Image: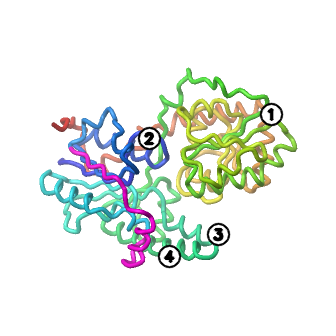
Amino acid sequence: MGDILFLTHRVPWPPNRGDKIRSHHLLQELMDCAPVHVACFADDEAEQQIDWARKVELQSCEIVIRTKPKWLGGIEAIVSGKPVSVACFDSPEIHAYVAHVIATRPIDCIFVFSGQMAQFIPADFGGRVVMDFVDVDSAKFESYADEGSGPMAWINRREGRLLRAYEKDVAGLADYSLFVSDAEARLFRKRSGLSDARVKAIGNGIDLEFYGAPDVQPEGLEQSGPMILFTGQMDYQPNVQAVQSFSNEVMPNILARFPEARFAIVGRAPAARVQQLDGRNGTIVVGSVDDIRRWIMAADVVVAPLRIARGIQNKVLEAMAMAKPVVASACAAEGIDAISGEHFLIAESVGDEARLVCELLDNPQQARRLGEQAKRLIDTQYSWQTQLQDLPALCGLSEPVVAEAAA
C-alpha cells in the first residue's frame, strides 16, 4: 500500500466543531495505517499556524488561507454554472500541491472530506477515491429554499439543484461515497441511483476519555434556577434558527412553570441574530468557551431543537456521553441509534419541547435515569474505534503500518 492524500475543507485540528471533529478522527485513523499527505484550508493566519502534536507524522501538509471573498465566489459560480460552495473553495495552490504530490509520491488513495474538495481530484488519477460527503448538502439547501422567500430562496434553490447534480457526478467517479448516517446514505442512494456497495454509512463517534473525564467540575456556573443548554457553532444557520425558535417560542412556556430557568447558548461565533436573544426569555448568550464539558456538566437538560438537520448531531452525542438528559427534535435525533424514552426524548413539536423539558426539570430522578442510560449506550456503541472500524478496508489498507515522520 502506498500513500494517502487527504483533502479537507478546514484544518482538521483542533477538533473544536462538528466537521473538524469528524475529519480529525478520520485523519488519525488513516495515519495509523499509512503515510498521509494533507491539503486543507484555513480561515486566517492564526488558524494556519495552529500546531498539533501529530502534525510531524504527516508526510507533507499544505494549508492555504482562504482569501476569496464570498461575493467573488458567488460571481464565479454564476459565470461558471457551478455551485457557490464549490466555486468559493477553488484554489490554484491546492491544485498545484495535489499535482505535485501525485507526481512525486506513490499515492494509492485520495480521501476527500466534504464535497467542495472533490474538485481537486485530477481527472486522470488512476488510484482509489473515497469521498466522504458527510451529509447530503444539496438536500439541506433545498430545505432552506422551501422555508425561505425572495432572493435567498432563489439562491438556495439554485445551490440545491446544482449541488445535487455535482454530488451525483462526484459519486460516480468515487469508489466509495460515505455518509454520517444510514438515513443520509439511503437518501443519497435514492437520489444518485448508486448501489449499497458504493454508498456507505460511517457514523460519528465520541472521544470517551475526554467526555468521560470524572474530574470536570462546573465551578463558577452555579445559579439559583435550572439551566437548559444548547451547544454548537453559532453562525451556522440551522443552529441560529434552532435557538431563535427555542428562545422565542419554547422558553415562555418553560418560564411559566419554572420562572428561574435559564437557556444558555454556548458556542463559537454567535451571529447577530443570536446575540439579540441575550437577556430575553431567560436566554443567556455565552459564546465560545475554553471547555464545553463544564457547561454540559452544569446543565439540567440539554436541548437540540433543530428545525433543519442533516446527519448526526455531535451536540447530542456529547451530552449523552456525559450522562445528561437530552430533548431533541425528530430531525436532530435522526441517525442516532437510540430509543426515545430510554436514552433521550424526542419532541415532535414546539409544544412537545416545552412539555418534555418541564417534565425532566420536575422529575430529577427521571432525568438522572435517562442520562445514565444514554451514557451506557454511548460507551458501548459510539467510540471512534467502533465507528471507524471499516474505514481502512474501504481505503484499500490491509494491515496497519508505521508511517515514518516527514523529514
- The residue tagged 3 is 147
Residue 309 magenta-highlighted: no
Q: Earlier in the sequence, mark 3 or mark 1?
A: 3
Disc 3 and disc 4: Cα gap in Å? 14 Å
In terms of secondary structure, where does tag 4 sit?
Answer: helix
In terms of secondary structure, where does tag 3 sit?
Answer: helix
Q: Earlier in the sequence, mark 2 or mark 4?
A: 2
Please give left or right for residue 237 compared with residue 54 in the image: right
**Mark 3 is on which residue type?**
Glu
The foreground one among 234 and 303 is 234
**Mark 2 is on which residue type?**
Pro
Neighbor class of circle 1 (other Cα within 10 Å; few <14, some 14-19, many 20+) is: few
**Mark 1 is on which residue type?**
Asn
Asked whether the viewer can see residue 282, the reply is: yes
**Mark 4 is on which residue type?**
Arg
Disc 3 vs disc 1: Cβ atoms closer than 8 Å? no
Q: Which mark is residue 15?
A: 2
The residue range painted magenta reads 60-83
Asked whether the viewer can see residue 390, the reply is: no
Q: Please, is residue 158 above or below residue 327 in the view?
A: below
Q: Position of residue 131 (x, y in %)?
A: 35, 58
Q: Which mark is residue 32?
A: none
Residue 78 picture quarter: bottom left
Coloration of the structure image: rainbow
Disc 1 vs disc 2: Cβ atoms closer than 8 Å? no
